[in-house]
Image: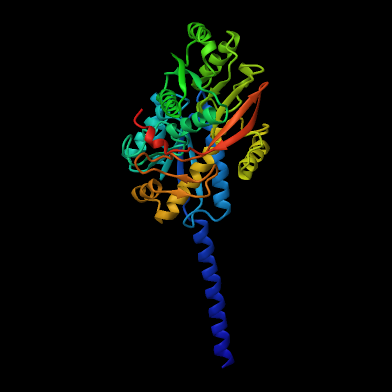
């Protein structure tokens, strides 16, 4: 009896060791879920590519620390399109897809991200812009596998129009539109439509191109309307937008300037020394004063890792939110297969998104209901002012 019991104990012990070995090696050999990031890691579009990518890595670290997704870790694989999206965007997307990417994260703009997102669409995997605004994704645009985690442009423009009219009591807007990319023109049109719905008037309108070295003519025309305007709405992005502000101030335009999300961040403030009486609409404050604790925590993590005071660019936060949303979609789908994940993401309603409740509209595969943060700039310093949600469904402003 003792002899048989001893044999059984040996068998059980060996079995336990074998099972532990198998379990350990199975966990150790689980393949990561690869997410491609074909963006501008270098060059002039770096702020809209590299910085959201770096914030996305924080999200990946957090997800992996919590056990991964479907029992597998996440892994980002990047490709530098060198800010030449037209020449390199599609090739970069193909490169990361060939490495096993089940989805790609792309730059912050419809024009800049389209080549990569279109490539993802052809492969029937998700192409997700970090923070494009133009409502040209999804089934109505590039295709059902294309998404943006950014605030849809009508949503972006609606909130500042309501704030300017109701809180600032401004009534007369002068619109200066940078026509280089579709986003800015869409923003100016959406703002104008909502502004006039509220009862505001347009004191004047003018256009320029981001690469224009001089906007002297536009400044001269604006100066002739100084007495009939309350503020200037600038629809642009750096560096051309910063140059336009510098020329406005030098040309005697001292009215308040309100900027769209494309101008977010203070990385360009040194080109307009002492800028004051200016405002930005954006995703969140990067200065450690945001009312959302997680935003401030990420700002501290950024400073510690990259040895800079803060992210300096609020679009970066959408890298974190893009991973949040993709992970939620994979969990909901129960798979990493493109069609299932796309279906899950197109109907996503994430109540605990980084910047707020994030609901995807399946017609456009982006959100029309995200909160918008307004930043005030005084003497070259940015500070959180307020955060608001739209009072109407901004989708009603379409078409533009």
Which part of the image, by quadrant, shows the C terminus? Answer: top left
Task: Please state if 162 lies on the left or on the right of 189 as rendered.
Answer: right
Q: How is the image coloured?
A: rainbow
> x%, y% of residue 62?
58, 49
> x%, y% of residue 92?
42, 32
Q: Residue at x 43, y 40 (%)?
A: 367
Task: Please state if 394 lies on the left or on the right of 301 as rendered.
Answer: left
Q: Quadrant of residue 185?
A: top left
> x%, y% of residue 325?
47, 46
Which part of the image, by quadrant, shows the N terminus? Answer: bottom right
Depth check, front residue: 121 or 391 = 391
Task: Please state if 14 lies on the left or on the right of 125 as rendered.
Answer: right
Depth check, front residue: 32 or 387 = 387
Q: Quadrant of residue 331?
A: bottom left
Q: Does residue 39 appear anywhere in the picture?
A: no
Q: Residue at x 62, y 21 (%)?
A: 277
Residue lying at the far bottom in this picture: please name it.
1
Q: Residue at x 68, y 38 (%)?
A: 304
> x%, y% of residue 379?
68, 21
Mark count = 0
Q: Is residue 15 above or below residue 212?
A: below
Depth check, front residue: 350 or 148 = 350
Q: Does residue 397 appear anywhere in the picture?
A: yes
């Amino acid at each position: 009896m003792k002899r048989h019991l001893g044999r059984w104990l040996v068998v059980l012990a060996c079995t336990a060791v074998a099972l532990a070995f198998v379990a350990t090696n199975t966990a150790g050999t689980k393949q990561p879920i690869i997410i491609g990031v074909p963006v501008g890691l270098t060059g002039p579009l770096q702020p809209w590519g590299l910085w959201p990518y770096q914030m996305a890595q924080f999200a990946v670290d957090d997800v992996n620390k919590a056990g991964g997704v479907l029992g597998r870790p996440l892994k980002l694989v990047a490709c530098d399109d060198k800010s030449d999206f037209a020449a390199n965007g599609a090739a970069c997307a193909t490169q990361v897809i060939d490495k096993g990417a089940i989805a790609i994260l792309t730059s912050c703009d419809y024009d800049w991200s389209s080549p990569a997102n279109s490539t993802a669409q052809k492969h029937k995997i998700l192409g997700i812009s970090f923070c494009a605004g133009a409502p040209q994704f999804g089934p109505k645009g590039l295709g059902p596998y294309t998404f943006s985690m950014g605030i849809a442009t009508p949503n972006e423009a609606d909130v500042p129009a309501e704030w300017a009219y109701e809180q600032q009591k401004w009534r007369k807007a002068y619109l200066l539109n940078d026509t280089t990319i579709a986003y800015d023109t869409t923003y100016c049109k959406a703002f104008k439509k909502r502004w006039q719905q509220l009862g505001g008037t347009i004191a004047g309108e003018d256009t320029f191109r981001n690469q224009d070295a001089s906007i002297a003519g536009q400044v001269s025309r604006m100066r002739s309307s100084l007495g009939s305007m309350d503020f200037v709405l600038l629809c642009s992005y750096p560096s051309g937008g910063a140059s336009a502000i510098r020329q406005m101030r030098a040309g005697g335009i001292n009215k308040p300037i309100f900027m769209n999300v494309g101008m977010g961040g203070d990385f360009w403030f040194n080109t307009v020394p002492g800028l004051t009486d200016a405002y930005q609409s954006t995703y969140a404050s990067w200065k450690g004063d945001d009312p959302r604790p997680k935003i401030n925590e990420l700002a501290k993590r950024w400073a510690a890792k990259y040895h800079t005071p803060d992210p300096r660019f609020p679009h970066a936060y959408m890298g974190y939110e893009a991973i949040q949303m993709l992970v939620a979609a994979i969990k909901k789908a129960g798979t990493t297969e493109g069609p299932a994940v796309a279906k899950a993401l197109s109907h996503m309603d994430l109540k605990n998104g980084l910047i707020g409740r994030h609901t995807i509209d399946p017609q456009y595969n982006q959100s029309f209901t995200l909160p918008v943060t307004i930043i005030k700039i005084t003497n070259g310093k940015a500070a959180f002012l307020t955060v608001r949600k739209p009072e109407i469904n901004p989708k009603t402003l379409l078409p533009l």
